[in-house]
Amino acid sequence: MAQITQTNGLFQQDDSARDRLNAVNACKRRFLRQDVTATLIVFAALVLVPQLPFVKGWMLSQASLAIIFIIAALGISILVGYTGLVSVGHGGFLAIGAYTSALLTKYYAVDLVVGIIAATLVSAFFGALLALVFLRLSGAFMAIGTLGFAFFVGTVVNNVPIFEGRDGILLDDNVVLGMEIGDFGFYYVSIVTLAVMTLFVYCIVNSGTGRAFMALRDSENAAMSSGVNRLLYRTLAFSISAGITGSAGALNAHIVNYVSAEVFADIWFSVDILMAVVVGGPALLFGPYLGGIFVVMLPFFLEELADFAFIMKGVVLILVLRFAQQGVGEVMFRPIQNYRRRKLMEAGGAKVD
C-alpha cells in the first residue's frame, strides 16, 4: 500500500513538472508574439510611407536607405544576438554584394531582382569561406580579424582594375521584369526584400538551427556535449549573416546607381551596421528595425551638424552599453519584460517577490 502511495506521488510530481514546463513554453510563445507584433507595426508603417500625400521621391530614397540598413542589421544580428559572435567587418560583405550586383548589371544587364539574389548567394559563399578562418578565433581576436577583412575588401576594390577604384561604376536605371523603376518602384523592391529577409530570420531563429545557434551562444561546452556541431552551425550562422548583408549591399549599389571604392572601402559602414544592432537590440526581431532607422535618420535630421551627428552616435552607443546592454528595444519593453519575468517564474513554480 505504501509503495502504491509513493508511486502515485511520483506521478503527481511528474504531472506538476509537466504543467510548469507547458506554462513556461506558453509564456515564451506569447513573448515571441509581442516581439513579432512590434516588428509588424513598424513594417506596416514603412509600407504606408509612399501613400502619404506629402511624400516626395527624395524622401523615399532616404527611407529606402533606412530599409537597407535594417536588412544589414538583420544579417549581423544572426551573429551578435543569436550566436554570440562579434563582427566589425560586415561592411566587407556589404561591398561584396554591391559589386556583385553592379558588375552583373553593367556587363550582363541583369534584372535588379537577379542582382539582389546573386549578391546574396555570393556574399553567403564568401561568408562560409571566411568563417573557416574566423571561427578559429574568439572574442576580441575575432573582432579584429573581421575588421582586417573589411580593410582587405576595401583595398581590393580600390586597386583591382575590374572594380574601377575611386572612379567607380556608373549603372543604368534600375529594371525589374523589363520595366524601368523610379524611386517609388525601388522603395517597394526594398520593402519586399526586407519582408523576405525578416521572415527568413524569424524562421531560422525559431527552428532547430536557431536553437543550436543560441545554445552555442549561451554555453558552448554544454551545447557541444549535447551533440551540437560547433563548426557547422557557426559556419552556417556566418554564411547566413553575410548573405543577408550582401542583399543590403546590392540595394545600396542601386539606390544611386553608382558604386566606388570611395564609398564601399569606408570602414564606417561596418561600424554603423554593428551600431544599429547594438542600439536597437541584438536578440530582438524588432531591434534591427529600431537601430537601422536610428543610424540613418539621426545624420539626416542633423544634416547641418554632420560632425555632431557622429558625436551623438558615439554618446548613444556608450549610454546603451552602460545602461541597456540589450539595446534600446530592451528599455522600451522593460515593463513588459518585468511582467514576462514574473510570469515565467510563476509558471516555473518559483517564488516571486
Image: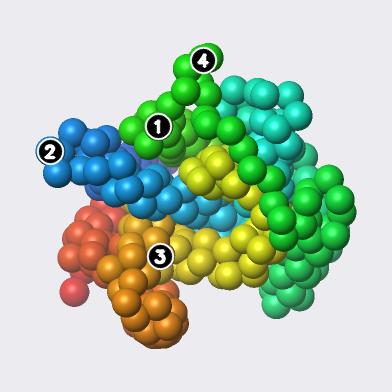
**Badge 4 density bin: few <14, some 14–19, many ≥20, Cα 10 Å:** few
Ranked by sequence position, the earlier of labels 2 and 4 is: 2
Give the spatial CA distance, label 1 vs label 3. Answer: 24 Å
Ranked by sequence position, the earlier of labels 1 and 3 is 1
Which amino acid type is shown beneath numbered disc 4? Answer: Leu
The mark lying in front, picked from 3 and 2, is: 2
Q: Residue at x 78, y 49 (%)?
A: 163
State which mark lies toward you, 4 or 1: 1
Pick whichever, 103 or 24, lies toward us. Answer: 103
Circle nearer the N terminus (4, 1): 4
Mark with earlier residue (1, 2): 2
Tell me the number on the disc at residue 57.
none
- The residue labelled by disc 3 is 295
Q: Which mark is residue 177?
A: 4
In contact (CB < 8 Å): disc 4 and disc 1 = no
Residue at label 1? Answer: 182
Checking the image for residue 53, the label placed there is: 2
* Image quadrant where residue 283 sits: bottom left
